[in-house]
Image (cartoon, rainbow, N blue to C red):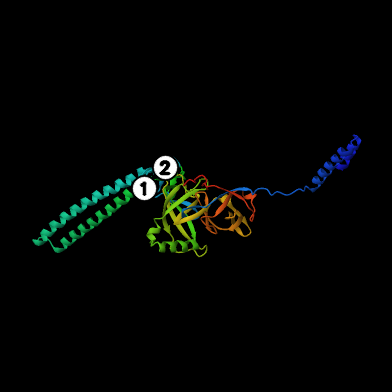
Amino acid sequence: MKRANFANRARGDGLSGQTGKALLAVAAVIALTACDQKNTYVAPPPPKVDVATPVQRTITRYLEATGNTAPIKSVDLVARVQGFLQSIDYQDGTFVKQGTTLFTIEPDTYKLKLEQAQAAEVGAQASLKQAEADFKRQSDLVQRQVVSQSTLETSTSTRDNAQANLQQAQVNTKLAQVNYGYTKVTAPFDGIVSTHLVSIGELVGVSSPTQLATIVAMDPIYVNFNVNEQDVLRIRAEAQRRGMTPADLKSLPVEVGLQTETGYPHEGRLDYAAPTVNQATGTLPVRGVIPNDKRVLLPGYFVRVRVPVDQQKDALLVPDTALGSDQGGRYVLVVNSENTVEQRKVQIGPLDNGLRVIESGLKADDRIVIAGLLRVIPGQKVDPQAQKIEAPQALAK
């Protein structure tokens, strides 16, 4: 149509002869050239993705569990003598040192009983002294045949009774002294005392020991947790391989963290492992002891626990963000030598300082996709951009 329009325009302009024929020829060439041009598809460049080789380092493998804290000492303070409560000598919930007086129970009555017993002991000592003197005198008289043997026997009996009375008086004095000591209820160890359960003027210890309060030791503190049977077998095998004794196992460190804390900031040691596995649960009760001088851990807390079991050299680690999952499990995307993406199935392990341990399925020189996962498809060519894996912010220990 361009050629026809051009020819018509040439005729309309009055062109003729050789000039008109030349213009018509040019128009025909342009029209034919335009008809031979075709649209061709140009493929886009391969997408750029960040790739990196796995981090390779020595890691510590941990046994992880959930446990609860328990006091290393907890004692109910009771009234061991009968009487009226005279005073409460502490503030509820305060920390007290061993030997601190906490309650006083009508001491005057028991002090008088102690003095009475002491006086009776003095009288018994005097009676014994007199009986011994009489015994010696009668013994001399019998030797000189001045008195009969029966008189000496009577004197001997009197002396023996005096000795027995003195022993009884001494026992009564000790009992009175003990009861007098019970009128002051003291702290048996350093700890925090609960609220008092009785009031001043209340009669306590009437028919049975009356509970006055409870004292709890806070430093150190126990952490109780359970280890499943499979982990027990693994730990025992590792201990046997390393030549560790049961005493060595008790020296293993224990790390504890509260639910609101990052990492495991509280460190102690393994203290006890039960001799048998609980058949009902298939677990072994284990206990650790944790220093708690700042009293951050309270008895009854649920805590996270981990115990280092062994070390693995040259472990492979990748960021969690580089992992994908499907019905077949976890995988990573690997760029091969031809810059083609491959999907690689892997077995994952625990987190270690923010990176995920890869148990199997990955080699140290594999280039894994660490960014731009949504832009790549297995089997597709990519433009890999070499990067270095940086560990996330270090977790607090």
Q: Mark 2, residues whose alpha carbon is within 10 Å: few (<14), some, or many (≥20)?
A: some
In the image, 85: left or right of 324? left
Q: Is residue 226 above or below residue 47?
A: below
Q: Is residue 227 above or below residue 82?
A: below
Of 275 and 358, nearer the camera is: 358
Image spot of residue 74 (x, y percent): 43, 50
Which quadrant holds residue 344? bottom right
Q: Which residue is mark 1?
A: 182
Q: Which residue is mark 2?
A: 95
Asked which secondary structure carries label 1, the reply is helix
Disc 1 marks a residue whose amino acid type is Tyr
Q: Disc 1 vs disc 2: which is toward the camera?
A: 2
Of 384 and 24, nearer the camera is: 24
Name the residue furthest top.
13
In the image, 319: left or right of 38? left
Image spot of residue 140 (x, y percent): 10, 59
Which mark, residue 51? none
Image spot of residue 66 (x, y percent): 51, 54
The residue depicted at 84 percent of the width and 44 percent of the height is: 28
Of 325 and 259, nearer the camera is: 325
Image spot of residue 113 (x, y percent): 32, 47
Of 67 and 347, nearer the camera is: 347
Asked which secondary structure carries label 2, the reply is strand
Q: Is residue 21 visible?
A: yes
